[in-house]
Image (cartoon, helix red, strand yellow):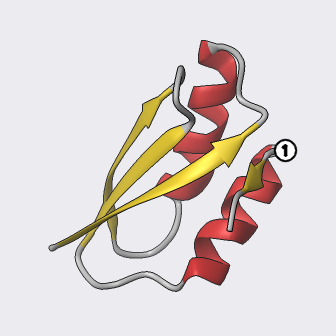
Amino acid sequence: MTETTYTVTGMTCEHCARSVTEEVGAIAGVTNVAVDLPTGAVTVTSATELGADDVRAAVEEAGYQLTA
């Protein structure tokens, strides 16, 4: 298992957090997604290491931005 934390901008409410959780959670191998709304931190636990591009695409699909 690997755990990586990303910073997502633009999330302001629980609906935002749910959208990001659903999109990132749909990536193959993801076992858990935890969003900390005040900081924008999104911690992703997965069976294998994920590509940042996959996570970025999922976050953008939800309507938000992954910071560099």
| Left or right: 44 as drawn, with respect to 17 | left
Name the outermost residue toward the top: 13
Q: Residues within 10 Å of mark 1 (few under 14, many from 20)?
A: some
Name the outermost residue toward the left: 1
Within the image, what quadrant is residue 66 found in?
bottom right
| Left or right: 68 as drawn, with respect to 27 | right
Give the number of marks.
1
For badge 1, the amino acid type reads Gly
| Left or right: 4 as drawn, with respect to 3 | right
Residue at (57% x, 35% y) in the render? 40
The vertical placement of 57 against 43, above or below, is: below
Q: The residue tagged with tag 1: helix, strand or loop? A: loop
Q: Which residue is mark 1?
A: 63
Percent from the top left, x then y, of residue 13? 66, 14
The vertical placement of 61 against 38, above or below, is: below
Within the image, what quadrant is residue 20 found in?
top right
The vertical placement of 62 against 39, above or below, is: below
Residue at (50% x, 57% y) in the render? 6
Percent from the top left, x then y, of residue 2? 22, 73
Residue at (70% x, 59% y) in the render? 67
The vertical placement of 61 against 1, above or below, is: above
Q: Nearer the viewer, residue 38 or 63?
A: 38
Quarter the N terminus occupies: bottom left
Percent from the top left, x then y, of residue 65? 78, 52
Q: Nearer the viewer, residue 54 or 11?
A: 11
Residue at (68% x, 68% y) in the render? 68
